[in-house]
Image: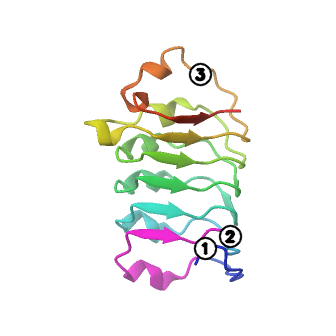
Amino acid sequence: MSSNPLNLARLPDWLSKLNLFRLNFAKTGITGHLPRWLSSTSISMLDLSSNQLSGSLPHWIGNMTNLSILNLSNNGFHSSIPLEFKNLSLLMDLDLHSNKFTGNLGTIFSKSTKDLLDHYNSIDVSRNRFVSHIDDNFGNKASMESIQVLLLS
């Protein structure tokens, strides 16, 4: 569905009944908040970039433990990253650029890891409003051992 100007007001509820592995609704005109039904899915790749989503990143995002790719870039999110985000141990590629996120980046870097598949490949949190100090040892965190792209500007 990506890049089709569907002018959707929101993600259709009927999607919650499907057993989806990937959900890509980038550039489709979605507005509003993330629907709560996403928290009970087994989606591994979620791309809702370049829409008009807004509000805070919900705490239940931490329930989406199968996520390996998350792209919410180019939207209007304006909250801090919830502590539950550290539950996304399989997350390898994270793109949150061009929003209005605030607060502490440490939550992103402190996700739990068990093996090499739990490490980040890429993180892009550029063009947000993070103001926290980055820990001098964040590069030594287990989740950062194999990172290839890190955009913080």
Q: Residues within 10 Å of mark 1 (few under 14, many from 20)?
A: some
Residue 63 shown in magenta: no
Whichever of labels 2 and 1 marks the residue nearer the N terminus, that label is 1
Q: Looking at the picture, how far across and down is residue 21, in whole percent? A: 37, 69
Residue 15 shown in magenta: yes
Q: Which residues are magenta?
A: 11-26
Q: Residues within 10 Å of mark 3 (few under 14, many from 20)?
A: few
Whichever of labels 3 and 1 marks the residue nearer the N terminus, that label is 1
Q: Amino acid at mark 1?
A: Ser
Rendered view: 58 above or below 114: below
Q: Which residue is mark 2?
A: 27
Foreground label between 3 and 1: 1
Q: CA distance from mark 2 to mark 3?
A: 32 Å
Q: How is the image coloured?
A: rainbow
Q: Which residue is mark 3?
A: 134
Q: Amino acid at mark 3?
A: Ile
* Element class at badge 3: loop
Pointers 2 and 1 in contact (C-beta within 8 Å): yes
Foreground label between 2 and 3: 2
| Quadrant holding the C terminus | top right
Horizontal side of residue 129 vs 121, given as left or right: right
Q: Residues within 10 Å of mark 2 (few under 14, many from 20)?
A: many
Whichever of labels 2 and 3 marks the residue nearer the N terminus, that label is 2
Q: Which residue is mark 1?
A: 2
Toward the viewer: 99 or 33?
Answer: 99
Q: Amino acid at mark 2?
A: Lys
Q: Looking at the picture, how far across and down is residue 149, in whole percent? A: 55, 36
